[in-house]
Image: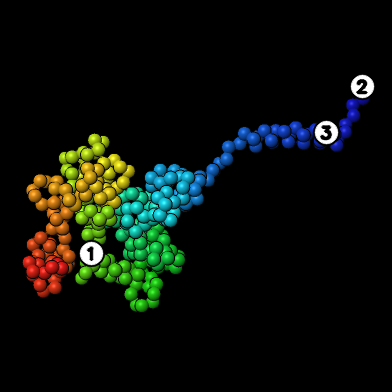
């Protein structure tokens, strides 16, 4: 018997077998990384939409012409997209419960708070955004002789208190005459929705899906929160809530201050105090 070798046929046979093997490998291969799905292209992945309680199939879940990723439901100065990317809770204005709103935090410790970093065009997760060896707080963005940190401090002081300017503690998002920060102080020992969380801790007392500070009737009884009388003392909650404010920023609470707006006219005769 005579053996013959046909090199071209052998190469073709080898490539055919190899091609089949390669195709089998590729067909069974699992991608090493699959990009997170953002079905509605609002900037938030489907998984993140569960955290923000928005729809993964509607870019503007509440129909207010603002994409879900750009919404700021907790009014802390940071939108949903920034919050989830930075490890903050998008439905909690003070994620770490340190009495400082997430937007007022200084995540990268460069002397400039998070929201002001956005205004400066820097990154609140990078202390030296332009990599020039100077922290962002030590820069002087507008070249006015004051570095960014000093300007940040001045702005914070002006926002904290000032004539005719309500401080952040006086904000009332749902217009129920109860300040946002005081919404959860009501209802101690009560549990309106029977979910095992007392109302003074529960951010959604009536389990309606709305955070209490944006729900004028948090317990769902048909009476606005400010018109309730939680402690039964004859003074409604709205009036009691007003008592701890300091409208003229003089360090004296309105309840004790005889001239709430510091206009020189006693509150007893001042119709616009």
Left or right of 36 on screen, residue 86: left
Circle 3 packing at 10 Å, graded few (<14), some (14-19), many (20+), is few
Q: Which corner quadrant holds the N terminus?
A: top right
Q: Which mark is residue 1?
A: 2
* For residue 196, above or below residue 256: above
**Residue 250 in view here:** no
Q: Residue at x 10, y 52 (%)?
A: 235
Relative depth, front residue between 65 and 222: 222
Image coordinates of residue 212 in percent, x first then y, are 26, 48
Task: Give the mark toward the camera: 1 or 3.
Answer: 1
Mark closer to the chain start, 3 or 2: 2
Image coordinates of residue 226 in percent, x first then y, are 19, 52
Relative depth, front residue between 161 and 229: 229
Q: Which mark is residue 146?
A: none
Q: Which mark is residue 166?
A: 1
Residue bearing the label numbered 3: 10
Q: To which quarter of the image does residue 18 belong?
A: top right
Relative depth, front residue between 261 and 220: 220
CA distance for labels 1 and 2: 105 Å
CA distance for labels 1 and 3: 87 Å
Relative depth, front residue between 256 and 126: 256
Left or right of 30 on screen, residue 89: left
Mark closer to the chain start, 1 or 2: 2
Q: Residue at x 13, y 71 (%)?
A: 262
Mark closer to the chain start, 1 or 3: 3
Left or right of 38 on screen, residue 116: left
Circle 2 packing at 10 Å, graded few (<14), some (14-19), many (20+), is few
């Amino acid at each position: 018997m005579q053996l013959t070798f046909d090199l071209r046929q052998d190469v073709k046979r080898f490539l055919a077998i190899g091609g089949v093997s390669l195709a089998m490998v590729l067909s069974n291969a699992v991608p090493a990384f699959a990009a997170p799905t953002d079905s509605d292209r609002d900037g938030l992945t489907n998984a993140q939409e569960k955290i923000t309680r928005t729809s993964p199939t509607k870019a503007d879940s509440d129909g207010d012409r603002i994409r879900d990723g750009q919404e700021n439901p907790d009014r802390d100065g940071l939108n949903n997209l920034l919050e989830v990317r930075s490890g903050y809770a998008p439905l909690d204005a003070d994620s770490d419960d340190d009495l400082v709103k997430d937007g007022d935090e200084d995540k990268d410790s460069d002397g400039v708070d998070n929201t002001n970093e956005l205004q400066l065009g820097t990154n609140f997760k990078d202390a030296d955004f332009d990599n020039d060896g100077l922290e962002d707080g030590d820069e002087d963005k507008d070249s006015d002789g004051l570095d960014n940190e000093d300007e940040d401090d001045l702005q914070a002081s002006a926002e904290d208190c000032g004539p005719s300017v309500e401080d952040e503690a006086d904000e009332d998002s749902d217009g129920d005459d109860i300040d946002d920060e005081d919404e959860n102080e009501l209802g101690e020992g009560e549990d309106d929705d029977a979910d095992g969380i007392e109302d003074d801790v529960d951010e959604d007392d009536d389990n309606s899906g709305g955070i209490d500070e944006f729900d004028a009737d948090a317990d769902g009884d048909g009476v606005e929160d400010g018109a309730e009388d939680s402690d039964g003392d004859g003074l409604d909650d709205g009036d009691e809530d007003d008592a701890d404010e300091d409208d003229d920023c003089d360090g004296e609470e309105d309840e004790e201050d005889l001239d709430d707006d510091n206009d020189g006219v006693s509150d007893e005769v001042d119709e616009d105090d």
